Image: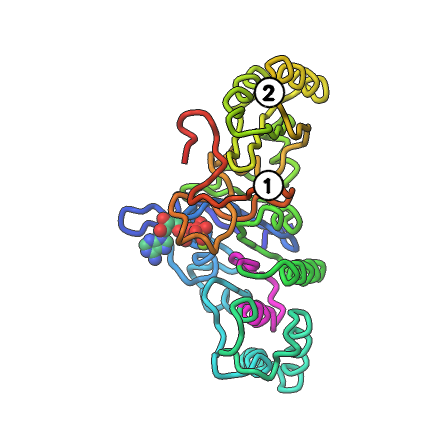
Amino acid sequence: MAPAIQAENLVKTFGDVRALDGVSLDVPEGTVLGLLGPNGAGKTTTVRVLTTLLRPDSGRAVVAGVDVLKHPNKVRSLIGLSGQYAAVDEYLTGFENLTMVGELYQMSNRAAKARALELLEWFNLTEAKDRTAKTYSGGMRRRLDLAAALVVRPPVMFLDEPTTGLDPRNRLALWEVIETLVEQGTTLLLTTQYLEEADRLAHDIAVVDHGRVIARGTADQLKAQIGGERIEVVVHERGLIGDAVAALSGYALNEPTVEKNTRRITVPVSGGARVLADAIRELDARGIEMDDIGLRRPTLDDVFLTLTGRVAEEQQEEDGAAPGARGRGKGKDKDKGGAGGTDGPGPDRQAVAAGKES
Ligand SMILES: Nc1ncnc2c1ncn2[C@@H]1O[C@H](COP(=O)(O)OP(=O)(O)OP(=O)(O)O)[C@@H](O)[C@H]1O
Ligand SMILES: [Mg+2]
């Protein structure tokens, strides 16, 4: 099938920053591509080029069969976009905002109102539909902005971090909306810092770093590509971390990852249960007390770490307060109820080997 979105060798520089350094990607019709990458990797810049908001220095892009550089207006009529900027009118109610968008796109007043009500329901905004948008909370505004992008059911959609700032319930609700759209044939390019979101929604994932696509495949392919399994150990106290890393280094395919706060060490291995048994014996022999140890398959977090050398870090809200944290997003480990969590200012989990430190 012809790709609904195609980019070839996009280059964009801002002064001496090479934001895009030859981005190429394609998204087959009716599929979802998840664009992952650390802060500053070039995700938003890619989206802005593909949605006609920014002209690249060089390269080519085609969306829904139309050349983005030659016919930007035509492209605009075929796409939906929701980004970090909200296209919401503060002084109109949620209902009026969505109705207005429908009418701008030549829907009849009746059809626009019906569509507005349907979207308000989807996004849990029915109760707030008659309040002006300026009274909405951040998450409500975000949902209204997303709803506005969906009014006309465009064949191709771009969502730049759609669930940033949404609470878990609304995030789940949005995932369902997205899945429905895709079932109905919409092609979607989605950027996200939530690897779980990419895992669930994206057919295909492109990992971007320094303005280039550095890996491409399904979540399973990327996990297989980085290979092996992971031994995860939680040692009883922080002082044991160094000894445990030394004890496990003989089994490691790659440098172990250490989360100091949770005392968790993750070691890429191959060989399955036998290696786990050996590792347990080794730790026991050295008298290293463990709270937990287990074997698991690689996650997208491991893919991200292995490919970019950076951890997808928790909580974008903390961005300003955490200048040391380059990646952001939701580490799945945080969901496992590990004690402590991250209260330090920087990344608490880092690759041990030299050169991988943030
Ligand atoms: N208008 C601009 N002027 C100057 N530099 C820019 C501009 N837009 C982007 N950049 C730079 O280009 C690079 C890529 O930025 P981009 O916004 O595409 O990253 P991103 O992958 O979306 O990051 P994030 O995860 O933080 O949203 C960064 O170094 C950024 O500072
Ligand atoms: Mg961005």
- Amino acid of disc 2: Ile
**Real-space Cα distance between discs 2 and 1?**
19 Å
Q: Which residue is label 2 attached to?
A: 288
Q: Position of residue 279 (x, y in %)?
A: 64, 18
Q: Let me know if residue 6 is in the magenta part.
A: no
Which disc is residue 339 wearing?
Answer: 1
Q: Position of residue 295 (x, y in %)?
A: 68, 28
Q: Residues within 10 Å of mark 2 (few under 14, many from 20)?
A: some
Q: Position of residue 331 (x, y in %)?
A: 57, 43
Which disc is residue 62 wearing?
Answer: none
Q: Let me know if residue 143 is in the magenta part.
A: yes
Residue 181, quarter of the rendered image: bottom right
Q: Is residue 291 above or below residue 121?
A: above
Tell whether label 1 touches label 2 (CB within 8 Å): no
Look at the image and name its color scheme. rainbow
- Give whichever of 28, 2 is nearer the camera: 28
- Give whichever of 293, 90 is nearer the camera: 293
Q: Callout 1: helix, strand or loop?
A: loop
Callout 2: CB less than 8 Å from ligand 1? no
The magenta segment is 142-164
Q: Quadrant of the C terminus?
A: top left
